[in-house]
Amino acid sequence: MRTFLAVGGYNAGTAELKEMLATAENREEFILTTVTFLRYYDFDGVALDFVYPDINDKPLMVLLLQVN
């Protein structure tokens, strides 16, 4: 069985995800803390569920997913 950390979703709304995406520093902090959490608890991955993003969120989401 595989376990994934789910982030976002219908009930989460969009405010917190928009704040996380807003700056490079916020995106980096999200990545670092998420990877640390995944490794510590031996998760297999993360599922990002950004419900109802607007047109301005798309480029920021791409930046989040492209970080090395």
Image: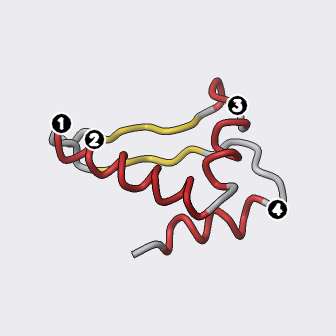
Residue matched to label 3: 13
The residue tagged with tag 3: helix, strand or loop?
A: loop
Question: Mark 4 or mark 2, which is nearer the start of the sequence?
Answer: 2
Q: Residue at x 76, y 44 (%)?
A: 52
**Location of the N terminus (image quadrant):** top left
The residue tagged with tag 4: helix, strand or loop?
A: loop
Total tally of numbered discs in the picture: 4
Q: Position of residue 38 (x, y in %)?
A: 25, 44
Alpha-carbon span between mark 4 and mark 1: 33 Å
* Name of the residue lying farthest toward the right: 55
Residue matched to label 2: 37
Between 24 and 55, the residue placed more toward the observer is 24
Residue matched to label 4: 56
Question: Mark 2 or mark 3, which is nearer the start of the sequence?
Answer: 3
Alpha-carbon span between mark 2 and mark 4: 28 Å
Q: Residue at x 37, y 48 (%)?
A: 46
Amino acid type, callout 3: Gly
Amino acid type, callout 2: Phe
Give yes or no for contact between labels 1 and 2 (Cβ–Cβ under 8 Å): yes
Residue matched to label 1: 41
The residue tagged with tag 2: helix, strand or loop?
A: helix
Amino acid type, callout 4: Asn
